[in-house]
């Protein structure tokens, strides 16, 4: 492959408080391995510490400094400037991640004039421009050696793309905010790199157009695979749309979505395939995430992935780079350890993915809500139908038979067990610390594979029970639950806080371990009992159709907004909400969200659509769209309320799509939708 002069970058501290020793170590690593670009991420999702806001002392807007964590701010300023000085001296450029639109928590209270009549922030208000310009200038005043910022226009308290009644349309809104930041950075002699991070085609293309109109020099940082990193999703087809701006590819060689660094993983084939594909677009360069939640590959066997990526970028012999890594780290067992690592990519495909379908939440053990939102119960039906077009649904996904699903999980469990046994035979050939690290990873692989096999059986038997009404599936469900719990107890006893299925972010310094498996089981049993009773009650009512919202077996060709529409428990019942349960933490304005189902109706007849709902407040406010007919619901409520809406079917159709949209800052709880003729 022709050698090109490209940016070779890494991104670190994802997404955690910045620590001096680790930050300086990564800078030294970058210098040693000739990376020329480093991105610092930091605690971007923390509403106090996140983004450049949490790292910066405002000058003109100093009245908002009181809400900052000054200890974190002062320490971060010291660490980052020290790291930047070292990087700068070696010719390595440094950047900080930042999300917009973001303002201080009580900004609206102080400047209520920035809001329109619906309570949403009006983006074009002069105070917004002034605040953004001063925030950036304050930041670069305090971090003079930072070369620029990496901009993301999502995951903020003010959802720029979701605001209502704006003077500017979505594309011009993106252009307006980005232009302010671009012009300010340019004026200060700094760079702005835009990170698309879109979840749907429409937003991606809109953002690209906005960036093109700002400047053909604006570097567009995109991802490796379609919408997020995965071992199974197809190549990113949108690279070909980045025509008028330089493309900068964002990659993940840590394994954030396939093991999160806790499982052994050598991405030799994955990196090769993705790199070769990306190179056809001649990108300006690459930046790779190498850590998550204080977990990193340094000093572990997974560090081999940094060597693989580095060899590809430098057009060097990849096989030699891999061999050199194992010889250096395991001199007396290099070939044997490499042999153990070769199949790990395929093993993880079979554990964390289900027939090529993204299996779990950030590749940790999934929550029940996540499993419902990702359709794992639906996909076990005989006539399964994944109607959603969300990013985690692979193109033309084919489950195959239920037997083939179980075979995949059994193969993973057996191979993981064999790899663990082979490792134990190498104990005398590896130094104590190196062996302990390998043993922990491969023990985790063994238990994780076994637990995910039982988890899959839970999905199968739960779904089959409600689909078939056969009591034997209920028995099999609870047998799988007990085996999963037993494996979880064994894994915790052996691995403690290092157990992959116990902790979500797997922080080394966590004082308490999250009981992910036990919590999942408790919620699964609770949901099952509620759903079983409600299903029995509805079956007696001679309805045309009904859906138990938020149930594991809700089906009905559920569609929803990407990554939104949680299923939760409210007052001892299950329901689905239009939006995220944590929505209020993210947004200072009306949080968004929607979901819809396809329900049967009586053709050529008057149908009564009964929506049973509640609210986070004493007002139930939502929009119900039945086919093309919109109905606004705005009523006082205490507990649950049944809202009856009329749908006259006049075209001889036997089904209709019913959509629920959030219509206020207060979360509507939707428990069920029933159709009466």
Image (cartoon, rainbow, N blue to C red):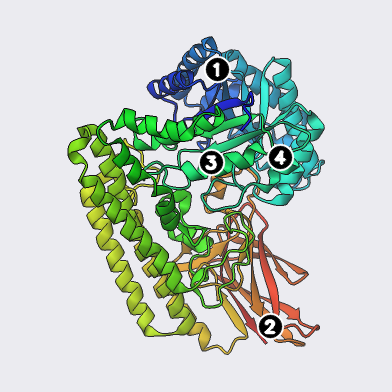
Q: Nearer the viewer, mark 2 or mark 3?
A: 3
Task: For mark 1, give the secondary structure.
Answer: loop
**What residue is at 21 percent from the left and 46 percent from the top?**
424
Q: Nearer the viewer, mark 1 or mark 4?
A: 1
Q: Quadrant of the rendered structure where residue 62 is?
A: top right
69 shown above or below 225: above
User: CA separation, marks 2 and 3?
Assistant: 51 Å
Q: Quadrant of the rendered structure where residue 115 is?
A: top right
Judged left or right of residue 498, residue 39 is: right
Q: Which mark sits nearer the N-terminus, 4 or 3?
A: 4
Residue, disc 1: 92
Percent coordinates x, y for residue 317 in the rendering: 49, 31
Query: In the drawing, what numbered circle is on residue 601?
Result: 2
Judged left or right of residue 567, residue 127 is: right
Query: In the drawing, what numbered circle is on residue 121?
Result: 4
Q: Is residue 546 visible?
A: yes
Q: Which mark sits nearer the N-terminus, 3 or 1?
A: 1
Task: For mark 2, give the secondary structure.
Answer: loop
Q: Is residue 120 visible?
A: no
Q: Which mark sits nearer the N-terminus, 2 or 1?
A: 1
User: CA separation, marks 2 and 1?
Assistant: 64 Å
User: CA separation, marks 4 and 3?
Assistant: 45 Å
User: CA separation, marks 1 and 4?
Assistant: 38 Å
Task: Kindly check if marks 3 and 1 are in contact, taking CB atoms under 8 A apart as contact.
Answer: no
The N terminus sits in image quarter: top right
- Count neighbours of disc 3 (C-alpha within 10 A) and say few if under 14, some if 14 to 19, many if 20 or more: some
Q: Which mark sits nearer the N-terminus, 1 or 4?
A: 1
- Count neighbours of disc 2 (C-alpha within 10 A) and say few if under 14, some if 14 to 19, many if 20 or more: many
User: CA separation, marks 2 and 4?
Assistant: 41 Å
Residue, disc 3: 272
Q: Nearer the viewer, mark 3 or mark 1?
A: 3
Query: In the drawing, what numbered circle is on residue 315?
Result: none
């Amino acid at each position: 492959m022709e050698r090109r002069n490209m940016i070779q970058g890494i991104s670190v501290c994802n997404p955690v408080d910045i620590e001096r020793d680790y930050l300086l170590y990564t800078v030294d690593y970058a210098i040693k391995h000739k990376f020329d670009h480093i991105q610092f991420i930091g605690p971007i999702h923390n509403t106090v510490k996140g983004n450049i806001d949490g790292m910066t002392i405002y000058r003109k807007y100093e009245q908002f400094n009181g809400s900052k964590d000054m200890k974190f701010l002062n320490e971060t300023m010291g660490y980052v400037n020290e790291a930047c000085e070292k990087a700068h001296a070696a010719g390595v450029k440094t950047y900080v991640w930042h999300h917009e639109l973001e303002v201080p928590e009580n900004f609206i209270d102080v400047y209520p004039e920035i809001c329109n009549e619906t309570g949403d922030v009006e983006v074009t208000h002069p105070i917004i421009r002034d605040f953004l310009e001063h925030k950036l200038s304050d930041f670069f005043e305090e971090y003079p050696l930072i070369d620029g910022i990496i901009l993301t226009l999502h995951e903020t308290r003010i959802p720029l793309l979701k605001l209502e009644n704006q003077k500017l349309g979505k594309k011009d809104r993106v252009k307006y905010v980005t232009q302010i930041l671009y012009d300010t950075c340019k004026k200060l002699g700094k760079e702005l790199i835009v990170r698309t991070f879109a979840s749907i085609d429409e937003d991606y293309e809109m953002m690209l157009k906005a960036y093109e109109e700002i400047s053909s020099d604006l570097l567009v940082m995109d991802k490796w695979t379609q919408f997020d990193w995965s071992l199974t999703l197809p190549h990113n087809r949108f690279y070909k749309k980045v025509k008028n701006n330089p493309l900068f590819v964002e990659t993940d060689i840590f394994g954030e979505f396939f093991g999160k660094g806790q499982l052994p993983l050598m991405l030799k084939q994955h990196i090769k395939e993705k790199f070769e594909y990306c190179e056809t677009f001649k990108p300006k360069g690459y930046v790779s995430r190498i850590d998550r939640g204080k977990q990193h590959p340094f000093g572990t066997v997974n560090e081999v992935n940094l060597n693989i990526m580095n060899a590809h970028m430098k057009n060097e012999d990849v096989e030699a780079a891999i061999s050199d890594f194992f010889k250096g780290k395991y001199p007396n067992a290099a070939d044997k350890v490499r042999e153990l690592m070769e199949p790990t990519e395929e093993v993880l495909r079979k554990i964390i993915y289900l027939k090529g379908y993204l299996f779990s939440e950030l590749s940790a053990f999934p929550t029940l809500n996540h499993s419902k939102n990702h359709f794992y119960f639906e996909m076990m039906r005989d006539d399964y139908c994944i109607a959603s077009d969300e990013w985690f649904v692979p193109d033309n996904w084919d489950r195959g038979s239920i037997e083939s699903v179980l075979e995949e999980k059994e193969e993973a469990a057996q191979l993981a067990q064999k790899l663990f046994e082979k490792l134990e035979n190498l104990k005398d050939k590896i130094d104590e610390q190196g062996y302990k690290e390998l043993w922990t990873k491969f023990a985790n692989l063994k238990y994780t594979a076994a637990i995910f096999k039982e988890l899959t059986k839970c999905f199968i038997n739960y779904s089959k029970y409600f689909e078939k009404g056969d009591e034997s599936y209920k028995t099999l469900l609870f047998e799988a639950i007990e085996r999963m719990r037993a494996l979880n107890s064994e894994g915790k006893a052996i691995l403690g806080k290092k157990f992959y299925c116990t902790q979500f972010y797997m922080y080394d310094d966590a004082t308490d371990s999250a009981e992910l498996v036990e919590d999942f089981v408790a919620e699964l049993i609770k949901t099952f009992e509620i759903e079983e009773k409600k299903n029995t009650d509805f079956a007696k009512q001679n309805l045309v159709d009904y859906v138990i919202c938020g149930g594991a077996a809700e089906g009905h060709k559920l569609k929803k907004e990407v990554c939104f529409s949680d299923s939760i428990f409210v007052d001892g019942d299950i329901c689905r909400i239009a939006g995220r349960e944590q929505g209020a933490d993210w947004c200072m304005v009306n949080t968004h969200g929607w979901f819809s189902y396809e329900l049967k109706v009586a053709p050529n007849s008057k149908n009564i659509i009964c929506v049973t709902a509640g609210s986070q407040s004493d007002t139930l406010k939502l929009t119900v769209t039945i086919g093309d007919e919109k109905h606004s619901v705005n009523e006082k409520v205490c507990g649950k309320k049944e809202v009856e809406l009329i749908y006259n079917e006049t075209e001889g159709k036997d089904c209709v799509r019913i959509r629920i949209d959030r219509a206020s800052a207060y979360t509507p709880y939707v428990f069920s939708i029933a159709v009466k003729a």
